[in-house]
Image (tube, rainbow, N blue to C red):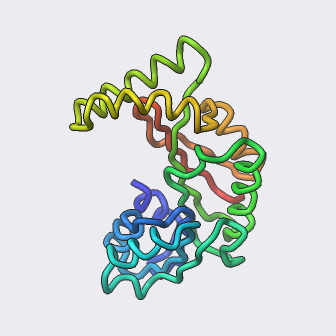
Amino acid sequence: MAAVLLAERATGDARILVLGAGGGLELKALGDMQPGWHFDGVDPSSEMLELARTTLGPMADRVRWHEGYIDDAPAGPFDGATCLLTLHFLPPAERLKTLAELHMRLRPGASLVVAHHSFPMEDPFGDRWLARNAAFAAASGVPGVQAKASIAAIKERLPVLSPEQDVDLLRAAGFADIELFYGAFTFKGWVAHRP
């Protein structure tokens, strides 16, 4: 989905910023769909970046690797960016700063694709969505005890925001034309553009 959304505005030889590139699955999917794209992959974990290199195999030559956070990413300008399964780890002020830094690194008109946990945490809504998420995980093969434990872990460790708050932060960072493209239990995804 991210590659399709980015390709709406990025050319066949685009340079794409991937914030949270550890593991490499996102980079591999993007690279497979767009063989002319080159990437800058940023992640704070050297072990995860090494795993990403292994996952990509020969395709790793299309990636410039940066260990760290958004401040460690090149200035760009980039033709598009992704930040998947990352922003839900950041408290609101740090999330806004990260989004603003992503905005500054994009060319005018470029797309940002984000996806992460985003749901209303207030009771009874938060508990209901977390229980649904855990039930889906268990039905997908995650051991029941582990799936149930994820409820407490998310509540205690993640500064989850509501979808409305996430959209407000994207706007405050300077993004426009914000569209929801994905919603599944506790996960939401948006595409937004730098004006």
Q: Is residue 127 left or right of residue 138?
A: right
Whole-percent x, y for residue 50 in the image: 43, 76
Q: Quarter of the image containing the C terminus?
A: bottom right
Q: Is residue 78 left or right of residue 14?
A: right
Q: Nearer the viewer, residue 50 or 24?
A: 50
Q: Is residue 174 left or right of residue 139?
A: right
Work out which residue is located at the far top of the displayed protein and give it: 124
At x 45%, y 79%, the residue is 37
Q: Nearer the viewer, residue 33 or 75?
A: 75
Whole-percent x, y for residue 71 in the image: 72, 69
- In this rendering, the answer to whether 36 lies above or below 47 is below
Whole-percent x, y for residue 92 in the image: 73, 41
Q: Nearer the viewer, residue 36 or 169?
A: 169
Tell how many labels: 0
At x 58%, y 13%, the residue is 123
At x 53%, y 65%, the residue is 9
On the image, which quarter does residue 132 sit in?
top left
- In this rendering, the answer to whether 6 lies above or below 58 is above
Whole-percent x, y for residue 39 in the image: 50, 77
- In this rendering, the answer to whether 164 lies above or below 102 is above
Q: Quarter of the image containing the N terminus?
A: bottom left
On the image, which quarter does residue 149 sit in?
top left
At x 41%, y 69%, the residue is 27
